[in-house]
Each structure stands twice: as C-alpha cells, then as structure tokens.
Amino acid sequence: MKLECKHVWENISAYIDQTMDAKLREEIEKHLEHCEICSAVLDSTRNILVLTADGRTFELPVGYSQRLHERLEEELKKGGEVKS
Amino acid sequence: METRGTTEAELIARVLAGETQLFHDLIRPYERMVYMTVFSVVKNEAEAEDGAQEAMINAYRHLRSFRGEAKFSTWLVTIAINEGRKRLRKSKNAAEESIDAPAEGEEGEFTPALLTDWREIPSEALERKELREALRIAVGELPDIYRQVFTLRDLEQLNVEETAQALGIQPGAVKVRLHRARMMLQKRLVPFLKTTAPRRGRWLGRAL
C-alpha cells in the first residue's frame, strides 16, 4: 500500500511521539525513505521541538526563584500551619 | 535539615507534620514548570510571576488535599492553570468592553509548510538567538488552546494523560491540539529558517 504525503503529515505528531501501531509506523518509514518533502517536514518539526526543550528558548525572569522563595518564606512565617 | 535522598512523599508528609520549611525543597524542582504554565495562560511576564507565586502559596495552603492520586507535579500544574485562568478572567472583566475572542478555529487545515529546495537545518542554525526569539513569538501567537497544550507537552514534557488532567480535557483533544500546534509552528518557523540559514551543502551533516 502506498501512503499519500497528506496522510503522513496528519500522523507526524503521532510518529514523533511513537504512539502509532507498528504497521502504520512501518509504512511511514518506507514513505520517508523516498519522499524528501515529508522528510523535511519531519526534520523541521523535530527541530522545533528540540529548540522548545532547550532551556535558553523559554527563560525564567532573572531573580524569579529568589523572589518566589522570599514570598513563600513570608507565607510560612505568617501562618505556619497548613490548612486542615 | 537533611533532605538529600528524601522522597517527595516523605517531604510532603514532613511538611504536613510541621516541618514547613521543607516546602521550599519540595517545590524547587517545579519552579520553572509552574511559571511556564501560568505564562502559557496569561502571556505576560509580571502576571505570570505573580501568578506562579500565588499558585505555590495555594499549593502550600492546600497541601493536605493532595492525596497522591495524581503525581505531585501534575497537581501543581493544575493549580497553576487555575491560577492563570482566574487572572485571565479578572483582566478580561476589567477591560471595559471586551472584544469577543475570535473563534479559535477547531477546524481548518493544519498542514505543514513544504520545503522543496531546502531540507536540513544546519545544527549551528539552531544555536542562533534569532531563531529562539522567532519561536517564542510564534508560540505566543498560537491560539490559547493550542499554546497551553504545546507548553505542557513539548516545553514541560508532561505526558498526554497528565496534560489532559491539568487542562480538564480529554486525552484525544490533547493529541489533536498538540498536532495542530506543532504544524502551525512548523509553518511559521520554516520560512524563517529558510531565509536565515546560511547556504551550505548537504554534506555538512544532518539536522538533529
């Protein structure tokens, strides 16, 4: 059976997340071997995910952690007790 | 206070038993996650920081209601989502005449951008600041429902079930929204990569 490109794109996330059955996976892999367009879609999507997970892309505000713990400390001192 | 090697469940039990200072250690691994989660809802740094602090305080106050059915991280993310939503409602109410949000297209085509003359992103391109900036902007411009799922799944690496639980949606919806978010981002980012990536031969190696 020959897969259409559109069908590959629709399943690209499932392919990346490895949540598809083995048969479809195999078909997609076969398709990718000879289809440059779909390979490029896959590569570029994967690269975006790599960039997203890179800690430098989405950064915390400078001093965030310190301010958070200071505020927590106030709260801990104030009430002390966890609600029951 | 020795906390090394202490499990999360032990830490929680000790905080509840009165060692409240240990709450600092308990939440330390999740500071980033909670901030990014609130940010994905409110889309404003100051508001996200304040919301993250508030979410952590709420978590402290309600720690006794954490029963361990979900992971502690998922429980925190759920609190963070709720805090973000509360803030969003407030700011919307505050606006005199809120323009109805455009329907966040659940339908429509979600197809990737096709590349015919370019295939691989040289790995040094991924190192560029402009690219990260472009990605931040593109994520910020995603419709809310897609941005939230994308943040929890691909930024914070929650699994499908945890994401569904935190957002109060079905796992199927998580998968559909994530796919659409990724395709929208791919479409937005590819032209950028194409025009800024230096022309180089293919032999320089595959993309990541």
Image (spheres, coloured by chain):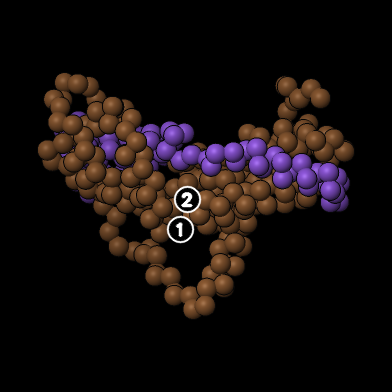
> Alpha-carbon neighbours of circle 2 within 10 Å: few (<14), some, or many (≥20)?
many
Q: Is residue B114 left or right of residue A83?
A: left
Q: Are marks 1 and 2 in contact (CB under 8 Å)?
A: yes
Residue where numbered disc 2 is placed: B149
Q: Amino acid at mark 1?
A: Ile
Secondary structure type for disc 1: helix
Which label number is shown at residue B80? none
Q: Is residue B125 left or right of residue B54?
A: left
Q: Residue at coordinates 62% horizontally, 49% vertically from top-left?
A: B52
Q: Is residue B44 above or below residue B21?
A: below
CA–CA distance in space, label 1 to label 2: 7 Å
Judging by colour alone, the chain drawn in brown in this rendered image is B
Q: In which quadrant of the rendered view does residue B197 lie? A: top left
Tell me if I can see residue A2 in this picture: no
Secondary structure type for disc 2: helix
Judging by colour alone, the chain drawn in purple in this rendered image is A
x then y, percent, for residue B173 = 46, 55
Q: Is residue B58 above or below residue A15?
A: below
Q: Amino acid at mark 2?
A: Val
Q: Residue at coordinates 52% horizontally, 77% vertically from top-left?
A: B96
x then y, percent, for residue B112 = 25, 48
Which label number is shown at residue B145? 1
x then y, percent, for residue B11 = 77, 33
Q: Is residue A33 left or right of residue B83?
A: left
